[in-house]
Amino acid sequence: MKKTLTLILVWALALTTAYAQEVVATDIDINNCITQLEVGSSYDFNVTFTPSNTTNQNIAWTADDGISVNYLSGVYTATSTGMKSVTATSFSNGAAYDQCFFEVVDSSPEDPYGITEAEDYDSQSGVASGGSGVAVGYIEDGDYVLFYNMDFSNQNPEEVRVRASSDRTGGTLEFRLGSPTGTLISSVNITHTGGWNSFQDFTAPVSNVSGVHTLYLVFKGGSGYLFDVDNFQFNPGEVVAIEINNCIAQLEIGSTYDFDVTFTPSNTTNQNIAWTADDGYSVDYLSGLYTATSVGTKTVYATSFSNGSAGDQCTFQVVDSSPEDPYTLTEAENYDGQSGVRLGGSGIAVGYIENGDYVVFYNMDFADGASDVRVRASSDRTGGILEFRLGSPTGTLVSSVSITNTGGWNTFQNFYANVSGASGVKNLYLVFKGGSGYLFDVDHFQFTPAEVVATDVFINNCIDTLQLGDVYDFDATLVPANTTNQNLAWTADDGFSVDYLSGEYTATSTGQKTVYVTSFSNGAASDQCSFVVVDSAESARMSLPSDRALATDSQMVVYPNPAVDGRYHISLSGDITYTMQVRDLTGKVVWEQKALRKATIDLSAQPDGIYILQIPGLETRKLIKQ
């Protein structure tokens, strides 16, 4: 019993000591109070205790709407616009509290050029709903409503319209920026309308407003209720600007294009546009539909019907999409576009050339490349440099031709230079460089293609047998097909039976014979055909039985060879059905078929390369797929 009593006394003493040591808050301060939040955002409020070592530092958070702040954490969620407040109260002392007043705003811009319902204000002072809830009512002198983020842009509104009613003498509605006493942009006089539900439109001019503002509607007048406001709408001024919003850099000749514009302001009342073209006819006056009828630099103009000083233009190139051949003579005055030049040399040359000028020729097809260029030009001065560039006036430099004094503007001479890096289809710029004044005139130019050298050659009508006295015209195919020098050298093993240039062979003696062909452009590219020349009596003795006969003049023709698509046509003489095989260079059979007289070999599924056609009892032929 004594022990129990002792324990109770110890517990009571400890409890008394604990209570005696609790530090109670004497004050709290919301240390991160703000003035504004955006609707939809959240914010974590916090407090500072006095004293800082307050034992119980829990806070009870409340909001004026009863829901927007978390009771224990202080996290506030902005769910609606307007003036808001949050209260923090200490758990340890209910008399220790603080408040924060702030505004929740909608940050997205609002359009003052649409109808704005007055009752949809973001905040107000003194008013209430009127007009059966569809208007701002019970308006007295000094009251106001405000609208955040009204975006007047740069449209410079000229007028504002207010729909209002009054059963009294009315009053004045002031539109101000930023505050109830801010910049006055309009003042609308509202008069008696015959009743609170009899709404009428009132208008007034607007001045000095652009950009995004908080708009205050401030109500002024005598005593009592003044008027009700249903809605308002600003009317933009004249067109400030128009912009062609789909200007292009290039059109193909023969094509059409529909130009369009953007108005500033976007709700310009009269959105009609007058379209014109530099040639006077290529664009439809009202629709903006352009038809590209000729090549060159073109310009289209757009002008507002409502404001003739608001306009825009688009400059572009009309080009001929069909490739042009730089390896034929090109007249300089037939350019597709130019900068700075005029016709000179009695209209047959590009003249009045100064430093930095240029002309351009579209779609010049250099194919596999050019080796040099010839320019026919004249100069009565010191001359200058003609640069050939690809793609732009500062594009890849492929040649630079020095033009010197020729003794007069009408005294034309040829000038030459090497070319490097020109291949494929390109826009070719002739850029003129030099000192001050006129440099030179250009009559025409012509490129020389770079030589394409043969890599191989194939006799495509090799035979097995000729009769004594026959004349046979051998033919061959060069690889690649666009080899520049297509001349062939033909020779025979006897030194004289074949014509050196034409390949025509005359069978002057019997026996085993061989004809050779060699490319002029590459001596390593060669082929040969071996065959037998027989006399007619020997041919008859060698004939097979008629049902299996293969005539001594049997021939196999294969074409095309080389073949780009891998399909070859075979023509055979005689009435024998042959078994034909095509092998790749590893010996694998990639095609096989029996045929009488005609057949088609299909190697389209095989990779490019060399294949061997074998016809037992007839001959072997090399096939090229490329």
Image (cartoon, grey):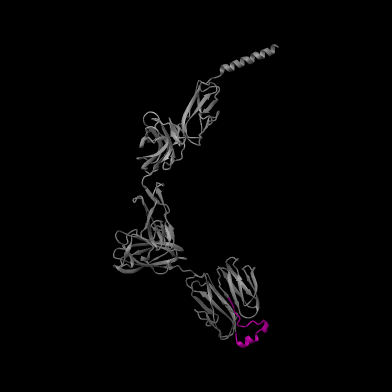
| Residue at image point 38% right, 59% down | 298
Residue 352 lies, with reference to residue 526, above or below; the image says above
The residue range painted magenta reads 534-557
| Residue at image point 66% right, 14% down | 8
Residue 352 lies, with reference to residue 155, above or below; the image says below
Residue 616 lies, with reference to residue 337, above or below; the image says below
398 on left or right of 472? left
The x and y percentages for residue 66 are: 53, 29
The x and y percentages for residue 183 are: 36, 35
Asked whether residue 29 appears in the rendered view, the answer is no
319 or 371: nearer the viewer:
319
Most extreme residue toward the front is 194
Most extreme residue toward the bottom is 537
Q: Quadrant of the N terminus?
A: top right
Q: Quadrant of the C terminus?
A: bottom right
User: Quadrant of the rendered structure where residue 250 is?
Assistant: bottom left
